[in-house]
Image (spheres, rainbow, N blue to C red):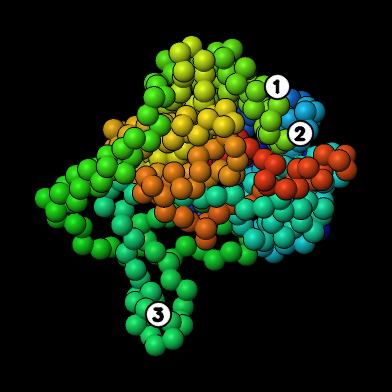
Amino acid sequence: MKAVVRPMEPADLAGVNKLRTLIYPHYPEAHYAEWHESVWNWLGTHPAADELHRWVVAAGDEIVGHLAATPQFYRINGRRVLAHTPADYQVMPQYGFQALSIMRKFFRTVENCVACDMVPTVIAVETRLGAVEAGKMQYAAKLLDVSRLPSPTLDDARRLLSRNGAGSRGHYRGFEEPGAATAEGEPEPPPVRPRAPIPAPVKGLLNRGLEVVDGALGSGMGSGVKVSRLGGAFDPSFDELFEEIAAVVPCIPEKDAEFLNWRYGPSSPQYPVTVLAAREGARLLGYAVLRVTREGEDGYILDLTARPGRHDATRALLKEAVREFRRQGTHIIRYRFSDSPTSPRMADLWRLGFFPRNDRSNTLLVKMEDEGLHETARNIENWSYSVGDGEATFWVR
């Protein structure tokens, strides 16, 4: 049956929810229709919500594809710019050609695009239609509980024991991320085989050892900077912090108090979050936004931003973030960000026991109508960007 790309209508909602379960049947999150609807209702409260677009691919009465364009304000070279991000991109495999058609609709509708993606097939479509890869984001993780130690599969063992190291690509269990859905054409995740648990006394001993090591690794980091929990809403001091950063960093999402209260406040799907604030007297030096998944095992540093040049503040925030996640019983910490004057240095992460996950890093892609802005935005070194700044983490439960 011939399929057409058209704007989404209210009557299409059930079809879009069904589409998600057909494409990602192996991910429980795909079956949480109410959750996804709550995210879209929240996106409808964005200050630029009138610029939110959604399209479907319809084959008769059946919805076989969906794509949205979510708006966000940025400061680029001191100018306020509205850019859109492709979101909830999904097309049934038998209608693969329409995957290009619906993305083409996106780029013909919006003037500017900023995307943070990790699926090669999606990145290939976006770059084919004019977006450029600004660069790879950093991805680091830290283990807090030995129950999440990776367990090699039989293929890994064969590869390690073979003379030349060749063989099937290994898949480590224990570090998979919830909600990390694959795109059309990507393989399904392998089944998780049961393994014998670590005896409780041994696990307790090893976890206490990790905690002792963390205390030693972080000794002296960020000393002199006071870090405390933010007790209420983001206040005007966050406006001042953002303006100071935007005057130095060429490209940054517009993260003033209004945006931060929308992004992480009580109406946000990610609420509640833990917000840490670093201060020098009454002056705000930086902040970190922490989120623990509903299962309580995965912790995300959604944002960690400090005044340029105040690496003592980023170190103090990073060290306190580790402590906070440990207090909440988190098993593993995940942190994706662009290396910038507002972020921790990689040496700080290694010092605190984080390890790189370059095989799972995201790519920042941009396309700006204005040539001058595009030239600036296409270099990731000009960006201050964390994974919580965009659509990539809207769907983390």
State how far apart marks 1 and 3 are (Cα).
Answer: 52 Å
Callout 1 crowding tier (Cα within 10 Å): few <14, some 14–19, many ≥20: some
Residue nearest the viewer, comparing 67 with 33: 67
Q: Would residue 30 be found to the left or right of residue 130 on screen? A: left
Under circle 1, the secondary element is loop
Does any portion of residue 11 appear in the rendered image? no
Task: Select label 1 or label 2 by which is in front.
Answer: 2
Say what amino acid the circle numbered 3 marks: Arg
**Amino acid found under the numbered disc labelled 2:** Ile
Q: Which mark is residue 17?
A: none
Secondary structure of residue under mark 2 = strand
Q: Nearer the viewer, mark 2 or mark 3?
A: 2
Quarter-wise, where is residue 231 in the image? top left
Is 194 positioned to the left or the right of 281 in the image? left
Picture coordinates of residue 394, whole percent (x, y): 56, 37
Q: Is tag 2's residue or tag 3's residue first in the polypeptide sequence?
A: 2
Callout 1 touching callout 3 (CB < 8 Å): no
Position of 108 with respect to 126 (left or right) is right
Q: Which mark is residue 76?
A: 2
Label 1, on which residue?
47
Relative placement, left or right, of 2 versus 351 is right
Position of residue 392 relative to residue 356, above or below, is above
Q: CA distance from mark 2 to mark 3?
A: 47 Å
Q: Which residue is mark 3?
A: 159
